[in-house]
Image (cartoon, helix red, strand yellow):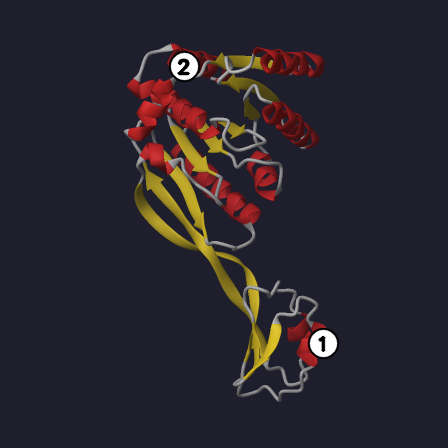
Amino acid sequence: MKQIVILSGKGGTGKTTVAAALAHLASQEATVTMVDADVDAANLELLLAPEKLETHQFVGGKVASIDQERCTDCGACIGLCRFEAVKRSSSGLEVDPVACEGCASCYYQCPAEAIRMEDQVAGLWYRSDTRFGPLFHAYLYPAAENSGKLVTLLKQQARQSAEDEKLDYLLVDGPPGIGCPVIAACSGMDLALLVTEPTVAGVHDLRRILDTVQHFRVPAVVAINKCDLNTDRRREIQSLCDAQGILLVAQIPFDTAVTRAMVHGRVVTEAADGETSRGLHHLWECLR
């Protein structure tokens, strides 16, 4: 099984559009499972129309809770909590679950043993079926943490399912940026496809994501989406790739057919046979 993660370094480059197109093209000749690793703002499902088969709770960590019957109201936990999560109220001492970081200092130091650490449900994850193959995706609750842990869980579930069913490809639509969820998305992958755009921000963040995947020793190739927007920036990306020995596998032109396809919930390679679709076909030929 070949494992490919699609990353961008920044939002808005068309990474998910490319990921969905690759899933479509891969499914024409092989078996594929997909992961939407952008758990903070998942949108791959908008193009794949998944049918949810399984729904599971995601436990992101633990949060402190005070048993009012055992609490002696000594206030020791207030002084211990560096996050100021313990407050006094009319009913006694209480923990603000949003402020609590789950460090358990209060739990270990409470003289009355009135504090317990409880699982904190931070979101939901799903195993779904799509017209291209299985999709593993998630919904992280607003302000919830541990998105990197959730991405790791999705990848583990998808990888195990793909191995059990002997599928050919695992495609991971990664999150933007270079933070923990990106590191979790690229960890252990065979190849990182870096989708960039010919803008100042696109070039800047391409350098950052290149540094990230190289640090974790994941081989990388680059594709320029909307390549005809700025000739100077496109040449700058080409020079950057040449200087670092990175293969530039595709230059995909801007095309309003992408937007028209998205409005109808379809992938551009399904809906149109223009320059963008041909560029994506060429990209897939380079990756397969």
Q: Is residue 133 above or below residue 39?
A: above
Tell me where residue 106 sits by quadrant.
bottom right
The answer to whether any part of residue 29 appears in the image is no
Q: Amino acid at mark 1?
A: Gly
Give residue 79's mark: 1
Q: Residue at x 67, y 77 (%)?
A: 78
Is disc 1 placed on a helix, strand or loop? helix
Q: Residue at x 65, y 65 (%)?
A: 103
Which of the two discs, 1 and 2, labels the residue nearer the N terminus? 1
Residue 179 position in % (x across, y down): 62, 41
Residue 58 position in % (x across, y down): 46, 55
Q: Is residue 119 above or below residue 227?
A: below
Q: Residue at x 57, y 87 (%)?
A: 70
Is label 1 in contact with label 2 (beta carbons under 8 Å)?
Answer: no
Observer-nearest of 137 and 197 = 197
Give residue 70's mark: none
Residue 2 position in % (x across, y down): 50, 25
Observer-nearest of 101 and 257 = 257
Q: Is residue 38 left or right of residue 30?
A: right
Is disc 2 placed on a helix, strand or loop? helix
Crowd rating for badge 1 (residues with CA inside 10 Å; few <14, some 14–19, many 20+) = few
Tell me where residue 96 sits by quadrant.
bottom right
The answer to whether any part of residue 191 appears in the image is yes
Give residue 276's mark: 2
Q: Is residue 224 above or below residue 263?
A: above
Q: Residue at x 52, y 85 (%)?
A: 91
Q: Is residue 207 left or right of residue 39?
A: right
